[in-house]
Image: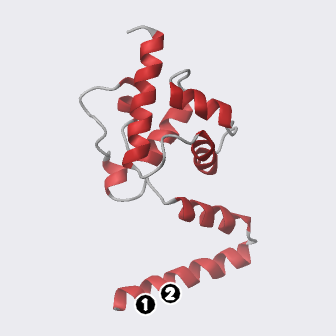
Amino acid sequence: MNSSNERESFSARLQQSLKNAHYSPDSPTRLAREFNIRFDGRPITVHAARKWLVGEAIPTQEKLRMIAQWLGVPAEWLRFGGADAATPHGDALNGLARFYSEDVKLIADLQRLDEHHRQIAREFVRMLVRVNNQK
């Protein structure tokens, strides 16, 4: 497979994975924002996200692994395709790999708090979980 076909095939798998995870495959701005919220390294630009979506580029391995984890698909499948299709891998099945956008933003806000207020927020969430489980 030539490099142009590889990029186009990657793009199709990325778009399908985004759809399966209830994200628009038509918004490079949203892709860049959601990716950057989750990625510890250097943020990507909207232009880079657009290139991924239209089949002009493939992300680095490190970025590809993050996308796969976020969208709940095997990284190898996302990069190369194959028989695994877009079935979620183990982490996604138990809900650890995929979070809703609002949850990720909440975690980012939590990390901006000082330690004392983070502890209060954690205890509050734990209390809500206990109350919810008693229903």
Residue 128, given in percent of the width and then of the height, sits at 49, 85
Residue at the extreme front of the image, as rendered? 26
| Residue occupying image coordinates x 33% and y 26% | 81
- Asked if residue 61 shows in the view, the reply is no
- Left or right for 36, reference 16: right
The Cα atoms of the two marked residues, 2 and 1, are separated by 6 Å
Secondary element at tag 1: helix
Amino acid found under the numbered disc labelled 1? Val
Relative to 13, does residue 1 appear above or below in the rendering? above
- Asked if residue 109 shows in the view, the reply is yes
User: Where the N terminus falls, by quadrant?
Assistant: top left
Residue 78 found in image quarter = top left
Amino acid found under the numbered disc labelled 2? Met
Q: Mark 1 packing: few (<14 Cα in 10 Å), some, or many (20+)?
A: few
- Left or right for 104, reference 46: left
- Left or right for 92, reference 48: left
Residue 127, given in percent of the width and then of the height, sits at 50, 87
Q: Mark 2 packing: few (<14 Cα in 10 Å), some, or many (20+)?
A: few
Pointer 2 and pointer 1: residues touching (CB < 8 Å)? Answer: yes
Secondary element at tag 2: helix
Relative to 131, does residue 122 appear above or below in the rendering? above
Q: Which residue is mark 1?
A: 131
Residue 110 found in image quarter = bottom right
Q: How many marks?
A: 2
Q: Which residue is mark 2?
A: 127
